């Protein structure tokens, strides 16, 4: 991960004694000189990496839970009749960041009930209360996307609630850019791809019939392919390049690692069969998300009437997704996006954009990857050649079916 350190070290001095200071002299960030007013702002910031420790992400399987005060459920209208009832949407990873901001934006309309599908039940409850989501507008359910058992239990619990499903937002993600060695899901898959791609693939497939039965004016399955503001994905001004210009770039190769199970034993933990790289594993999982969305569209749009779409909501440089990144990156990346690239978007604004893709009747087109311009107007963006390859999408789909036990 030369990118994550080498571009900073030549121009930054960190003093170990007393208070830590950042000294910037003609500092270049990603090859761009930071303006004097930004230098002044950064000089005043203080960082401490003395106590920084690498954290491990535990894989825990917990039985599905729902809030004990779940409000009454509005039943779906009879077949063939559209309803004016409140819509029901499942959002994965809704306890923080983009997921929480989207839950808030949808709940504030008074037209949606949010099922917050999260690993940490209590954290989700506290998060919903902290942003002021009315209790009648949300339900918390446990979901660990790194465990197929947890996913199946979540689906079973939801289906027994008799609550109709009108939209599914696959938002949760694992990002481990500094990891030297791979971590694995409960089933033994590399954690980033196993969670971000395989977990959401299984969840979406198991809930597809529920979406199909929806009598809501529009039913949608949204996969957040370009998640938050991952550097090297699309945080530059080049919004037509999935992997951006910052290495390591996403590359699925011939899928030999994916076909081998990503277990690091019989095969490589990387999709392309190469050496493990935490940042690349994440980016590869996002390409799989894009391919999966398009394959859903090709296979099921005409049959089900479901809208399948994805989006890049903008560069949320302050997202908690960067919690595993080095402290210096977390300090400098937000001002870099605010003052240099001008691509910074707040979590609140990004949440409104994702909520728009979920509910706006003007964004009903299926098979689309949505983005927003400088005027906050939505438009249909283009994906990279690999992320829009129909043959590769078919192969990823078929291999993924086998890995999750659906084929």
Image: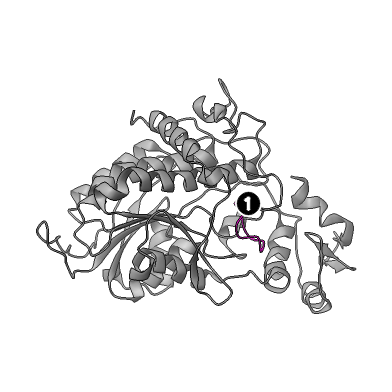
- Residue 264 position in % (x across, y down): 58, 26
- Residue 241 magenta-drawn? yes
Q: Position of residue 262 (x, y in %)?
A: 54, 29
Which residue is identified by label 1? Answer: 324
- Locate the N terminus and report the quarter of the image it occupies: top right
Residue occupying image coordinates x 28% and y 49% = 302
Residue 57 seen: no
Label 1 Cα crowd, 10 Å radius (few <14 / some 14-19 / many 20+): some
Q: Secondary structure at mark 1?
A: helix
Question: Residue 402, position in %: x, y?
Answer: 39, 28
* Residue 79: percent from left, percent from top: 11, 56
Which residue is painted at 47% across and 42% down in the image? 197
24 magenta-colored: no
Residue at point 89%, 68% (across, down) = 26
Q: Would residue 166 appear left or right of 181 to someone viewing this image?
A: left
Prevailing secondary structure of the magenta residues: loop
Count of marks overlaid on the render = 1
* Residue sitting nearer the eye, 360 or 273: 360
What colour scheme does the image use? one colour
Q: Is residue 294 above or below residue 227?
A: above
The answer to which image quadrant residue 235 occupies is bottom right
Quarter of the image that includes the C terminus:
top left
Span colored in magenta: 233-243
């Amino acid at each position: 991960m030369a990118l994550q350190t080498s571009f900073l070290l030549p121009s930054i001095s960190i003093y170990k004694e007393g208070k830590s200071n950042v000294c910037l002299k003609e500092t270049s960030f990603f090859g761009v000189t930071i303006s004097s007013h930004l230098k002044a702002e950064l000089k005043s910031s203080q960082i401490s990496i003395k106590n920084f420790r690498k954290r491990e992400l535990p894989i825990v399987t917990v039985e599905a839970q729902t809030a004990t005060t779940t409000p009454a459920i509005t039943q779906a209208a009879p077949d063939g009749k559209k309803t004016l009832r409140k819509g029901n949407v499942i959002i994965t990873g809704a306890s923080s960041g983009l997921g929480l901001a989207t839950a808030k934006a949808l709940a504030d309309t008074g037209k949606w009930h949010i099922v917050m599908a999260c690993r940490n039940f209590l954290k989700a409850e506290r998060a919903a209360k902290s942003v002021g989501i009315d209790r009648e507008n949300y339900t918390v359910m446990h979901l660990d996307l790194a465990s197929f058992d947890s996913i199946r239990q979540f689906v079973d619990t939801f289906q027994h609630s008799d609550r109709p499903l009108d939209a599914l937002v696959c938002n949760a993600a694992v990002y481990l850019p500094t990891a030297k060695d791979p971590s694995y899901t409960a089933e033994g898959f590399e954690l980033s791809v196993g969670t971000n791609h395989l977990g959401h693939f299984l969840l979406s497939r198991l809930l597809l019939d529920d979406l199909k039965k929806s009598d809501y004016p529009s039913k949608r399955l949204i996969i957040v392919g370009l998640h938050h503001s991952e550097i090297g994905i699309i945080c530059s001004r080049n919004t037509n390049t999935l992997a951006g210009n910052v290495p390591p770039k996403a590359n699925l190769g011939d899928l030999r690692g994916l076909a081998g199970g990503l277990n690091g034993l019989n095969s490589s933990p990387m999709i392309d069969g190469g050496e493990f790289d935490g940042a690349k594993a994440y980016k590869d999982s996002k390409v799989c998300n894009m391919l999966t969305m398009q394959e859903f569209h090709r296979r099921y749009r005409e049959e089900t009437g479901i809208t399948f779409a994805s989006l890049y909501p903008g560069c949320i440089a302050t997202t908690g997704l960067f919690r595993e990144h080095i402290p210096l990156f977390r300090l400098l990346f937000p001002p870099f996006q605010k003052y240099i690239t001008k691509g910074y978007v707040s979590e609140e604004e990004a949440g409104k954009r994702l909520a728009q893709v979920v509910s706006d009747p003007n964004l009903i087109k299926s098979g689309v990857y949505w983005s927003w311009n400088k005027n906050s107007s939505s438009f249909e963006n283009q994906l990279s050649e690999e992320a829009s390859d129909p043959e590769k999408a078919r192969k990823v789909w078929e291999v993924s079916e086998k890995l999750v036990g659906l084929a």
